[in-house]
Image: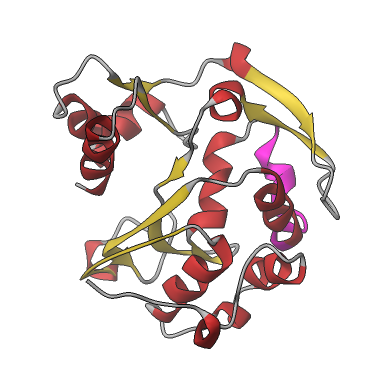
Amino acid sequence: TVVKKVGQKCLDAGAAKVLVLDNPCVDARRSYATSGIKAAVEGLKSPKAKVEYIDDNKWVTRKLPGARKLTEWPFYRDVLDADKLINVPVAKNHGSTTLTLSMKNLMGIIGGNRGRIHVGIDQKLADISSFIKPALIVLDATRVMFDGGPSGGDLKRVRITNQVIAGVDPVAVDSYGATLFGMKGTDIGHIVRASEMGLGQIDLSRVRIVGA
């Protein structure tokens, strides 16, 4: 899996610890098992790599100085303390934001009443992205849910596309991710808001894209 490959690359590069975590909407132990995340991390066979089950004592509230709407919110302390954050989202359709790509995936490191995020969600996702800036984004588009997301649960809505998009610019990565769905970054509200805040390049004609 993509998570396993990224984890192995981190270990190969000399990482002292590789911590894999998410704050899913349902039970984390079931989610990690069903998604294959737990098996992927265990497959690294390294004491340096582990899955983190969210500890509610680790939420810390931080102010977002560059935000326009979401001025403070609880974030997971281990993420804030990490030397490097690698964001590994799965590309999929989403009922509230049209798509889940890298910026929407940052919902997995925030606490609090996440239902409140859905009011004015486009700007709030951009605000979170102005505060949390991953060292690397690896967008997993090997299998893409094109409809019914995030939890439609129908395999007929999943297509094998076998693409992985890596970059450091969340706006550019998400704008490219949108093209997999026949859209552009300018079609997705939170990508537009992030672009307006100067968080990245939405115009792919101005992005150097290297294929492998």
Inspect this view and state whether residue 151 appears: no
Q: Residue at 37% across / 77% down in the picture?
A: 180
From the viewer's perspective, tell me whether residue 5 is left or right of residue 169: left
Task: Write the residue at 66% across / 40% down.
Answer: 114
Q: How many tags in the picture?
A: 0
Kindly report the secondary structure that dominates the magenta region of the rendered protein: helix
Image vertical order of residue 164 relative to residue 70, above or below = below
Q: Specify whether 144 is left or right of 4.
A: right
- Asked if residue 124 is positioned above or below residue 4 in the image, the reply reads below
On whether residue 116 falls in the magenta region, the answer is yes
**Along the line of sight, the residue nearer the viewer: 202 or 126:** 202
Establish if 205 lies above or below 177: below
In percent of width and height, residue 22 lies at: 45, 34
Q: Quadrant of residue 59?
A: top right
Indicate the quadrant where residue 121 lies.
bottom right
Horizontal placement of 30 versus 116: left or right? left
Locate the C terminus by quadrant: bottom left
Measured from the top left, where is residue 142 in percent x and y?
24, 62
Q: Is residue 30 magenta?
A: no
Question: Magenta stretch?
Answer: 112-122
Give the x, y percent position of residue 192.
68, 73
Between residue 29 and residue 105, name the one nearer to us: 105
Way the structure is coloured: secondary structure
Quadrant of residue 74 within the rendered picture: top right
Q: Residue at x 43, y 71 (%)?
A: 177
Q: Position of residue 166 (x, y in %)?
A: 37, 60
Residue 78 in sight here: yes
